[in-house]
Amino acid sequence: MERKQISDTLSVSSQISLEDVAFLKNEGIKTIICNRPDGEDPGQLEHDKIREQAINSGMEFHFMPVISGKMTPQDGDNFSEIINNTPTPIHAYCRSGTRCSILWALSELKVGATRDSILEQAAKAGYDLSKSI
């Protein structure tokens, strides 16, 4: 897992493993968000196993699957609701981290951040969201 810091309170990555849950716990993560639908790829670790590991480790877990290429403004609102009402720091994952980054960007637009500042912050983490927001 390559963890990328998007903001002071949010990091993102590709699919995580059960071992990654322990690593995230040791890094101080309090909440994990899964933005990846189960069964997206053959052999993908399903969210319920990660949820169980996270909860057993004392972390919160939220399953908010978003289909790649079919994101809606409501998805951004839902993500915003989660990140604003759960303990931080938060780690979100999907197939590559891009969906999580776009959801974060949509939530930032909702609270008045400028497109340029969002794009700059995402670029620092390695994500080009210029065609996504």
Image: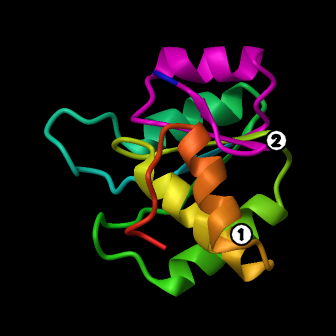
Instruction: Give the residue pinned by disc 2.
Output: 8
* Image mark for residue 108: 1
- Position above or below: 1 against 125: above
Tell me if residue 35 can be seen: no
* Label 2 neighbour load within 10 Å: few <14, some 14-19, many 20+: few
Mark toward the start of the polypeptide (1 vs 2): 2
Query: Mark 2 is on which residue type?
Result: Asp
Q: Is residue 122 magenta?
A: no
- Give the residue displayed 72% in from the left and 25% down from the top: 57
Residue 14 screen position, x and y as percent: 41, 35
Say if residue 68 shows up in the picture: yes
Q: Which residues are magenta?
A: 3-31
Q: Residue at x 46, y 21 (%)?
A: 1
Contact between marks 1 and 2 (CB within 8 A): the answer is: no
Q: Check the image and report above or below for 80 versus 88.
A: below
Could you tell me the amino acid type at mark 1?
Glu
* Residue drawn at the location 34% of the way across and 57% of the way down: 37
Seen from the viewer's position, the closer of residues 88 and 115 is 115
Q: Is residue 35 left or right of residue 54?
A: left
Circle 1 packing at 10 Å, graded few (<14), some (14-19), many (20+), is some
* 127 left or right, relative to 68: right
User: Is 9 colored magenta in this rendering?
Assistant: yes
The spot of residue 8 in percent (x, y) is 82, 41
* Circle 2 SS class: loop
- Give how far apart the Cα atoms at labels 1 and 2 are: 13 Å
Marker disc for residue 9: none
Residue 131 drawn at (x, y percent): 37, 68
SS at circle 1: helix
